[in-house]
Image: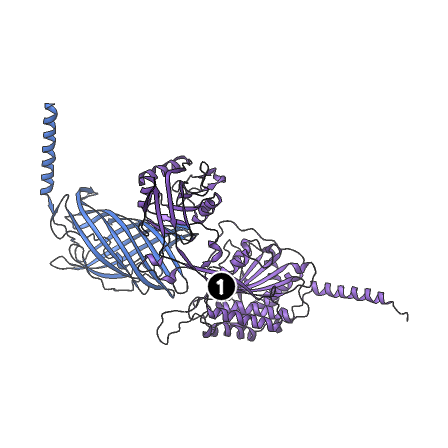
Chain colours: A purple, B blue
Amino acid sequence: MKKLPVSSIYIFFVFLSSVIAGCSGTQFSSGNGKKLITADFLYKQISYLASDSMKGRNTPSPQLDSAAAYIVRNFRDWGIQPWDGSYFQEVPICTDQLGDTNELAVIRNGASFELTIKSDYVPYDFSSGTSVTAAVVFAGYGITAPEYNYDDYKWIDAKGKIVVIFRNEPQKDDSLSVFKGKEDTKYISLKEKMKNAIQHGAAGMLVVNGPMQYSSVKARGFPWPSLSKVIPKDAVPLHLCIDNEDQIPAIHIGEETVKLLFGSVDSLRHLEARIEKDLSCVSYDLPDTKVSMHANILTTVYNAKNVVGYIQGTDPVLSKQLVIIGAHYDHVGYKKEHKAGEDYIFNGADDNASGTSGVMSVAYAFSRIKEKPRRSIMFILFAGEEKGLFGSRYYTTHPLHPLASTVAMLNLDMISRNSPDSLYLEGAKQSPDITNIIRKENKKTKFTLIVKNSDFIGGSDHYYFYKHNVPFMFYFTGLHKDYHQVGDSPDKVDCNKAARVSRLVFYTAGKISNEEIRYSIIPIESDAPIGQ
Amino acid sequence: MKTKSVMMIVALVLVMINVQVRAQEKFKLGYKMEKGKTYRYGQTNIIETTQEMGGQEMKMNTDAHSILKYDIESVSAEGTMSLVYSYEEVKFHMKGMGRDTTMDMKDTANKLVRAQLTIIGKLIKEPSKDTAKTGKSSLSMGSLATVNFTRLPDHEVGIGEKWSRVSTDTTDMGEGQIVYKKNIEYILTGKETKGTHECVKIEYKGTMEITGKMKQMGMDLVMEGNGDMSGTVWFDPVLGLMIDGLDNNTVDITMALTGQQQMTIPMTQKMTTTQSLRE
């Protein structure tokens, strides 16, 4: 027998390994799914996450942090890697209260007229907490809309000045208006108006009700608890801190302030009438007038956490692409006022300990299979979904890996209730390729798929991925009478069903993470319903 | 010059005579619904709700058409009526905030509430005869007891005369209550024919304050608001019945949620209601 040279043996092994890699790459072995993703596994996670000790995993709360720590312990035990050294992505969440040093004064010809908070002015919740004293310019509706050939800033220089603008849009009662008739356009948003004011260099924004469009020129602004007898402090909603970055002071003004600035409400009505007539630009600098304004916004910051686990792909090129498997791990907390002996904890077993456990089981399965995926996989458990998709919105504005290289997002939210064989797939219209993969992989799990081919995108964490054009699928087993009730407890979940859904996700992710193609996405329409 | 002066004097005299004649015409107004009879009113509500969240204004337009039925069970010698009121029909159409919904509210229709009112329309007893809670609808059965019973004066009034009403009405809703405090001034402005009815025309305007506290879906909800109202009622003094009514009100309300969700929702609601006796 002729001895092969060492180099030939090396080439042979390189060839062999490439064949093996090729086979494992295109032939993802799903046989382990049934063995690794079991009802017992799911039950263990759900019963822990939805136990009374977790007190409903509100965002933010120590119990939510405990849930995050539990997920991380498991990820670490299973060899799931952190991302860039950390299993957490901090999500800064803010809440605001109004302090007591607010100020609004109109300075005319050197004389200062102090106005009274609540009756004459009320700061908005999206106002910055800064102070400004500057000249004043009236800027119509504060809108620059080139597509409608409309610009309130056309004739004015707002740089360093305080702009006074109307709420709403012009010609709101005119069905033939270029502003989409009586429908709302994006320009109606006060935040859009603030963005536009900032782009034009404005230092502050005063908002007023147009006397023609509104029955009164009252200052309402934001309903701050400190200005009310009945609104509790904890009614002020949380928001992502990034929402109020780069803002200017913004105050809603009432009739007295209008009189000081414009002489009378009728003067303002006259300006409004001129815009209504033919969309004229009637903006102008208010002569010899300055305004001094300060919104005393007191902000408290909480850091909620997205939990992140990672499996590096094996393919040198494809591993730079990411498949995200996600679920939210928060719920809605507990009733603060309750009777003795009453069940007061919203356990959130189905919503969404089930989805969280599903993601954990898929992570566990991927950690245990020998043939690792060619594309990289990120497992994300989002915080703050119940408060307004905070975790996923923050992730998509601060992605750990570029969204352009994120090939798919599979979202599990409420996967353990209703009839054993039914499964909703939402996103079929938007992500047809992913839908086709799931249909094929479902031959192993045999669900009766209820595939929604609608514009409704569903109110869960896939929404912001879709907004960023990431192909997605939302796995969901439907609403039930215990939704957001204390009855959503671990004893009512169907762990067999949750395990089957998780296996379908595992098979789908296995397929996606071993393919080379990119999947189609039908881009979002600007007015697509969020469905929150 | 002389002619002008004479004409002015004549005009003044005519005005004075007219005022005197009208002043002499006094009305003792009262509800005179008859025992055993059923009265039906068609009612239309046009509601425009504007709410603001995070700097985004959202509008919801609602129009509701209903038929309200009053069965008069008894009438005392003083004119106090015991009546049962119910809806025969309630249809809603809501458009806005991404929804376009039509509802035929069969759950509200035919639910009965018994009430007792004095001859001038003062509610003295309103025990529930059947479940008339609002459930998921925004329609308040409780507050409808007096919807067609404008408060009449307890004394004779002539044209141009005013009377007022300060009231506190309470409506049960979602394990809680909404309290309406109203301060309304009425004026008898004249006479007008409505169909076959010789009516007196009552105009009113007033203010309203609203406070409320309730529980909905495990959340605590509080509300506060205030607003203005105005309207006209055409009342047949002989039959003792409202024939037509028109009411406009605008209310600024703030709702605040705590519990599962934290939310403050400032909203403005403009409502126009027309009512008409169906004969």
Give the farthest residue toward the right. A1
The one nearer the camera, B54 or B194, is B54
Percent position of residue B114, x then y: 23, 62
Specify few, some or many for label 1: CA neighbours under 10 Å numbering under 14, 14-19, or 20 or more: some
Q: Can residue A324 be seen in the rendering of this structure?
A: yes
Is residue B163 shown left or right of residue A463? left
In which quadrant of the rendered view does residue A202 lie? top left
- Residue flagged by tag 1: what amino acid is it? Asn
Mark 1 element type: strand
In which quadrant of the rendered view does residue A465 lie? bottom right
Residue visible at 57% across and 51% down in the picture: A522
Percent position of residue A423, x then y: 53, 64
Is residue A481 shown left or right of residue A2? left
Percent position of residue B241, x then y: 18, 50
What subunit carries mark 1? A
The one nearer the camera, A449 or A363, is A363
Please name the residue that numbered disc 1 is placed on: A303
Q: Can residue A212 be seen in the rendering of this structure?
A: no
Q: Taking A7 as reference, is A133 above or below it?
A: above
Percent position of residue A38, x then y: 58, 73
The one nearer the camera, B200 or A469, is A469
Which quarter of the image is occupied by the N terminus of chain A? bottom right
Give the farthest residue toward the front. A110
Residue visible at 40% across and 61% down in the picture: B262
State how many labels appear: 1
